[in-house]
């Protein structure tokens, strides 16, 4: 049994397989797993890299008899039932779970990949933090007229809203304290979204709340704003003249990359792997595909969202199906239970859309977000260190000064 990808889905599958006494070999291109929902905190200095990443081998201690192999999967030979890794190693499998997630989507916008900073991996977050500090120092040393630093976030979904909110809080906190040379008006922050509202996946009242909260923190929100091209220091967008920027964050969405391992497998119109109701790729019943990678049906005519819960639940589900298959039973359909969707905007400010039409905003939504992410999603990962770091920073509201992100390994 081989599971490719040690993210939310792959780890959930391996943990459940271990419970069923089934041995699995887990493969990941990194030696660590990343908790993506808190990457924006790393990028803005609220958390350390180690708070959101943990060695896979540490997690596997509790998932014996699972094994780990670090390497990037570059080929699946479906005739021989082998997975080829970049370094040349080959792993044999009887069943295969594909859980390699997605990647930043620049939507073909000219110049975006070259000039904008994405926020998808640990190295992205470290790079963004380093660039942010360079720009703050440059602004502090510049005698030019205001504004001295123009920050723009592209994408008004959860990641963009969270990042803009965290940058706004950072600006309010650092300016005048660590950067007495700077005034608040020296740093501008804009959030661009091509849809008519922020957080399109949420109820309109929650979208409006998010916008108001950001504007309260002096974020300029531009909706119906379609970015057409990005140049060095300038964004070309619909309905506005050229927008100048110094620091540009790309949080506009994700897509399944054209991984060589999946060449030839059918895709859904959105580019995710096409799977049956039992989460098996159409051509290969000996495999399962889960999480961001797979275009699993929500049962309501759409695909499941690219969020942690669908990946975790699918991971557990396929592991149970593999136990059934080993007992000679057929695989069952995947029933997804939606626990709701949430996004933070800042300290004690969040939106939550829960079951039965329950909608929360403000501190209570923020507490719900904190509870879900720290307790349910983070599980046994670095929960304690994150909790301590956060409790201190949010209760005392004393964020330490920024230091550059250590150079994280670049993503192959
Ligand atoms: C900035 C950000 C914020 C987010 N915030 C939230 C949130 O608040 N709530 C929420 O529910 N969801 C959030 N998400 C989405 C959530 O993180 C994903 O939906 C979830 O991680 C998907 O799980 P997965 O197992 O499919 O993939 P991932 O968790 O991405 O794991 C994929 C794994 O596969 C590995 N891999 C990739 N290619 C290869 C290869 N060829 N060979 C070997 N290994 C490979 C990767 O290194 C990675 O470890 C956020 C995502 C981002 C980027």
Image (cartoon, rainbow, N blue to C red):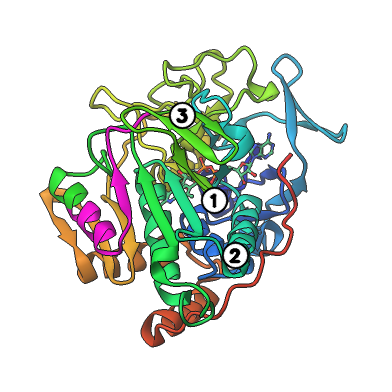
Q: Earlier in the sequence, mark 2 or mark 1?
A: 2
SS label for mark 2:
loop
Residue 146 in view here: yes
- Say which residue label 3 marks: 329
Task: Point out residue 407 in the picture as x, y percentages from the top left corner.
Answer: 74, 59
Residue 247: mark in rendering? 1
Q: Is mark 3 within 8 Å of ligand 1?
A: no
Q: Residues within 10 Å of mark 1 (few under 14, many from 20)?
A: many
The answer to whether residue 132 is above or below residue 117 is below
Task: Point out residue 362 in the picture as x, y percentages from the top left corner.
Answer: 21, 66
The answer to whether residue 186 is above or below residue 300 is below
- Say which residue label 2 marks: 142
Q: Look at 52% across and 46% down and name the residue there.
A: 248
Q: Earlier in the sequence, mark 2 or mark 3?
A: 2
Q: CA distance from mark 2 to mark 3?
A: 69 Å
Of 73 and 403, nearer the camera is 403
SS label for mark 3:
loop
The answer to whether residue 205 is above or below residue 175 is above
Question: Between tags 3 and 1, which lies in front?
Answer: 1
Q: Look at 51% across and 53% down and name the residue there.
A: 36
Residue 290 in view here: no
């Amino acid at each position: 049994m081989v599971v490719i990808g040690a993210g939310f889905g792959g780890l959930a599958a391996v943990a459940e397989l271990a419970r069923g006494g089934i041995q699995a070999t887990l493969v990941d291109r990194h030696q660590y797993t990343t908790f993506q929902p808190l990457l924006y905190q790393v990028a803005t200095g609220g958390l350390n890299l180690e708070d959101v990443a943990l060695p896979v081998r540490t997690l596997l201690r509790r998932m014996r008899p699972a094994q780990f192999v670090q390497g990037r999967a570059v080929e699946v030979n479906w005739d021989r039932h082998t997975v080829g890794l970049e370094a040349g190693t080959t792993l044999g499998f009887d069943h295969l779970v594909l859980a390699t997630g997605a990647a930043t989507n620049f939507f073909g916008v000219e110049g975006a990949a070259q000039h904008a900073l994405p926020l998808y991996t640990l190295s992205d977050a470290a790079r963004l933090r380093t660039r942010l500090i360079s720009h703050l120092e440059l602004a502090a040393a510049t005698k030019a007229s205001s504004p001295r630093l123009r920050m723009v976030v592209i994408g008004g979904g959860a990641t963009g809203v969270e990042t803009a909110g965290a940058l706004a809080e950072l600006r309010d906190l650092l300016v005048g304290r660590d950067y007495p040379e700077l005034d608040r008006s020296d740093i501008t922050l804009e959030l661009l979204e091509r849809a008519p509202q922020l957080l399109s996946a949420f109820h309109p009242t929650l979208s409006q709340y998010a916008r108001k909260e950001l504007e309260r923190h002096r974020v300029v929100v531009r909706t119906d704003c379609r970015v057409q091209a990005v140049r060095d220091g300038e964004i070309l967008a619909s309905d506005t003249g050229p927008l100048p920027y110094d620091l540009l964050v790309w949080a506009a969405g994700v897509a399944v990359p054209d991984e060589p391992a999946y060449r030839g497998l059918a895709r859904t119109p959105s580019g995710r792997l096409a799977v049956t109701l039992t989460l098996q790729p159409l051509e290969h019943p000996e495999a399962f595909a889960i999480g961001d990678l797979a275009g699993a049906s929500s049962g309501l005519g759409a695909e499941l969202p690219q969020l942690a819960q669908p990946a975790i639940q699918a991971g557990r589900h396929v592991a149970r199906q593999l136990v059934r298959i080993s007992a000679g039973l057929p695989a069952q359909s995947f029933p997804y239970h939606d626990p709701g969707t949430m996004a933070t905007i800042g300290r004690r400010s969040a939106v939550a859309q829960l079951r039965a039409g329950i909608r929360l905003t403000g501190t209570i939504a923020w507490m719900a977000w904190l509870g879900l992410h720290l307790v349910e999603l983070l599980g046994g990962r670095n929960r304690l260190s994150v909790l301590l770091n956060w409790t201190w920073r949010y209760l005392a509201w004393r964020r330490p000064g920024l230091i550059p992100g250590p150079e994280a390994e670049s993503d192959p």
